[in-house]
Image: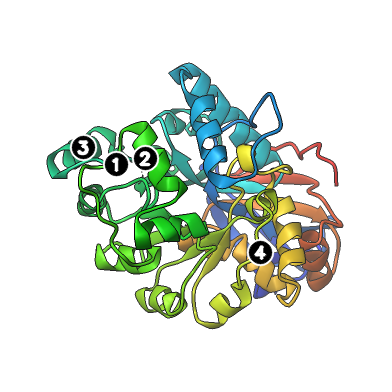
């Protein structure tokens, strides 16, 4: 190979990589001469994805958040387990062909692991939990019912969905049952209004669903402080979006060591102001990238997320953006071997045409080159047929 980008900070030029029948790298070293006009990049890590969610059909999908939530809930209602497994496998295959080899999947039905076992991907599957109305006993029962064992190349965790959809008792049950959590946090101003004052469209939605407890009183603080008070803010809790952080929240997140994942496609879908990711990185917060779902992303691919990230945060260097899509994703999922090439690690990489490492990284991040092929766990998959 002309070059191997081992991780966003280290390269071999020229280089060679050899892996065994189990898909593990056994040799990664500088080569005497280049054997092919290709460069290898680490496989991309999609740190937040809903593989089972399809694009919203019918009329123009809503772009206001709470109506969008209602539309997604209606679209999922009545889906059969086989349909959900097929959706997850089909979506994973789409992302794999485009260079994403590892996922932080939010499994809303318990069907994703069965689908993902049939692919060469890896990552962590988080079983989703909702129940703003649940007390302690019902919360523990729900967690017992939904805990999943690791399967193949996938570790597991729990996803107490968000502070507006999960009771304090359910957060406590999730925290007691699993070290590895992910939470949608501070995504909208309406969420912060609900937590601070107990009013707004989230209160209306919970009342409509019959999930607002009698005598409910808002905690009176924002989402990050609420998670901190509940004991959920921790290095093993992945926070999603963090679009509407309040004063002091960046220091709280950094002090807790919690990673954050941002989804540029969803930022564009809802026409949101980009959060200050460069500031978060300077504060020491690990920031990863995710595709979210096809219900809130018009161009659903990790390569598109990189291009969007470059446009949203032009002050970040290509190597920093690539790190968000590789090593930071592995760190966010608490699977630090992902997103880098190393001896003993998985043979996960994207091959692209090129010769000079810095130029290859820049061209890949900005969408000027596409994968020649993708290898996940030592298995070669075809390149995507997507528009540039």
Q: Quadrant of the N terminus?
A: bottom right
Of residues 295 and 149, which is closer to you in this image? 295
Among numbered discs 1 and 3, the one appearing first in the sequence: 3
Residue 99 can be seen, yes or no: yes
- x, y percentage for residue 78? 46, 18
Return the residue at label 1.
212
Q: How many marks?
A: 4
Label 1 crowd (10 A; few <14 / some 14-19 / many >=20): many
- Name the residue: 81% across, 61% down: 366
Of residues 380 and 232, which is closer to you in this image? 232
Among numbered discs 4 and 3, the one appearing first in the sequence: 3
Q: Are marks 4 and 2 in contact (CB under 8 Å)?
A: no
Return the residue at label 4.
273
- Name the residue: 60% across, 68% down: 275
Return the residue at label 2.
206
- x, y percentage for residue 88? 54, 31
Label 2 crowd (10 A; few <14 / some 14-19 / many >=20): some
Relative to 176, residue 78 above or below: above
């Amino acid at each position: 190979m002309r070059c191997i980008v081992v991780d966003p900070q280290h390269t071999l030029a020229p280089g060679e990589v050899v892996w065994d029948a189990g898909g593990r790298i056994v040799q990664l070293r500088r080569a005497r001469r280049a054997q092919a006009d290709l460069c290898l990049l680490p496989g991309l890590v999609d740190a937040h994805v809903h593989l089972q969610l399809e694009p919203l059909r019918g009329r123009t999908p809503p772009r206001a958040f709470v109506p969008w939530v209602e539309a997604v809930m209606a679209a999922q209602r009545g889906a059969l387990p086989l349909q959900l497994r097929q959706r997850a496998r089909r979506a994973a295959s789409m992302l794999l062909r485009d260079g994403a080899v590892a996922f932080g999947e939010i499994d809303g039905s318990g069907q994703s692991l069965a689908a993902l076992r049939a692919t060469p991907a890896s990552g962590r599957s988080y079983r989703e939990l909702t129940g703003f109305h649940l007390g302690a006993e019902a919360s523990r029962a729900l967690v017992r019912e939904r805990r999943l064992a690791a399967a193949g190349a996938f570790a597991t965790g729990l996803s107490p969905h968000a502070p507006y959809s999960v009771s304090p008792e359910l957060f406590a049950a999730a925290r007691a049952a699993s070290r590895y959590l992910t939470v949608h946090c501070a995504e909208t101003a309406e969420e912060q209004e609900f937590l601070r004052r107990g009013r707004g469209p989230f209160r209306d939605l919970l009342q409509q669903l019959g999930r607002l407890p009698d005598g409910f009183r808002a905690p009176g603080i924002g989402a990050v402080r609420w998670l901190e008070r509940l004991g959920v803010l921790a290095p093993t809790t992945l926070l999603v979006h963090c679009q509407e952080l309040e004063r002091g929240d960046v220091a709280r997140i950094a002090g807790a060591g919690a990673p954050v994942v941002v989804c540029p496609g969803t930022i564009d879908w809802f026409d949101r102001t980009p959060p200050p990711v460069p500031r978060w990185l300077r504060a020491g917060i690990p920031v990863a990238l995710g595709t979210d779902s096809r219900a809130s992303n018009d161009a659903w691919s990790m390569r598109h997320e990189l291009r969007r990230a470059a446009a949203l945060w032009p002050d970040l260097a290509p190597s920093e953006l690539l790190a968000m899509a590789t090593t930071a994703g592995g760190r966010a999922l608490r699977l630090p071997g992902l997103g880098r090439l190393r001896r003993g690690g998985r043979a996960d990489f994207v091959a692209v045409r090129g010769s000079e490492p810095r130029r290859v990284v820049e061209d890949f991040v900005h969408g000027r080159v596409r994968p020649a092929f993708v290898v996940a766990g030592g298995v070669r998959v075809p390149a995507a047929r997507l528009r540039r």
